[in-house]
Image: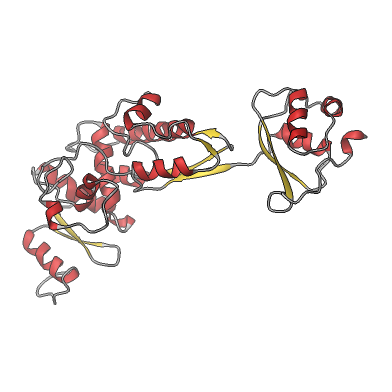
Amino acid sequence: MLFLVPVVPSRSHFENGVAFKVKINPQSGLVNIGSQLQEQGLSINPLVLQLGARGLFVSSKLKPGTYLFPTGASLGQILLQVARGDRVKESIAIIPGMSIWQLRNIMDSHAAIVHQTKGMSTKELLQSLNLNYPSAEGIFLPDTYIFDPDEIDLHIYRRAALGMQKHLNQIWDQREAGLPLKTPYELLVLASMIEKETGRSSDRDMISAVFINRLNKNMPLQIDPTVIYGLGPKFDGNLRKSDLRRDSPYNTYMRKGLPPSPIAMPSKESLQAAVHPAKSNALFFVAKGDGSSHFSQSLKEHESAVDRYQRKIAPKNIAN
């Protein structure tokens, strides 16, 4: 039968040397699909394509997308593959702790995405997504998003935003009583700070406790990642004392309470930690150098921990 004859040519530009890549546009009929396959180098007669599709009962089942057809594939094999929708897939990962400008750079540079939002301001991006937030920071759920080649970037942003909204609302409804958080957005802000300060996942609930305790006591949060975020994407990796003295809405050394927006994309684990802090009176923590932190209830103990773990001064009387 004609549709069993191989139609994939022997050409040097096969994908990975073993498969021929073609693209079928959305809303394409049989005749149009035949023309597209011909234009991309397959030796297919459009009339034979129609006969083959009807013979295999797939005329109305052919799906658009990008396909890899193996060497020597017949028309019948191609039709069945397209009917199954066995397409090439692409992916993009939103990593916990990633900033909005890092995400937009990755999205804008992805070769398989149609860049509809490239060059948009934050305000324009939010308007395109029908979202009413003061910032696009933190509102996209960290995950790996699978999509077909030539997907519009706005669709991926929308999936990530809806995913975050779903989890944020679920976790907000599960929050403990008495937390100093007035809205789900404040939860998102707090979770982003936990994300950036967590070196070891087992410390999340303790870091959350420190932040919650400080907020309850009206103490400044005093964390470097908020100051760094306020410096913007041009931060050179060296946080200076002058930066800590420079007032900004994100300088939690100079201003009490939460910063005005998240400072990163928080993970589900950080969202959970924000509403379920550890039962602790700790007010301070310092990195120990192994990814974990030492937590202290008093300034005196904290200063001793800083000497031990940061300044490398021999400890006097400090518990491990």
Give the colouring mode of the picture.
Answer: secondary structure
Q: Is residue 99 left or right of residue 300?
A: right
Q: Quadrant of the N terminus?
A: top right
Q: Is residue 68 visible?
A: yes
Q: Position of residue 295 (x, y in %)?
A: 18, 59
Placement of 4 over or under 203, stated as above or below: above
Residue 129 spot, x, y in % from top left: 40, 26
| Residue in view at x 72 percent, y 49 percent | 13
Q: Is residue 104 left or right of residue 73?
A: left
Res 66 quadrant in image: top right
Residue 168: percent from left, percent from top: 34, 35
Q: x, y percentage for residue 206? A: 23, 53
Q: Quadrant of residue 171?
A: top left
Identify which residue is drawn at 68% across, 29% down.
63
Q: Nearer the viewer, residue 167 or 116?
A: 116
Left of 303 or right of it: where is 40? right
Q: Nearer the viewer, residue 206 or 227?
A: 227
* Location of residue 29 with respect to 93 vertically, above or below: above
Of 27 and 309, the residue lying toward us: 27
Q: Is residue 179 above or below residue 301?
A: above
Quadrant (top left, top right, bottom left, bottom right) of the C terminus = bottom left
Please say whether residue 278 is visible from this viewpoint: no
Q: Residue at x 14, y 50 (%)?
A: 222
Q: Quadrant of residue 173?
A: top left
Residue name at image x 89 percent, y 39 percent: 5
Left or right? Give the position of 56 relative to 205.
Answer: right
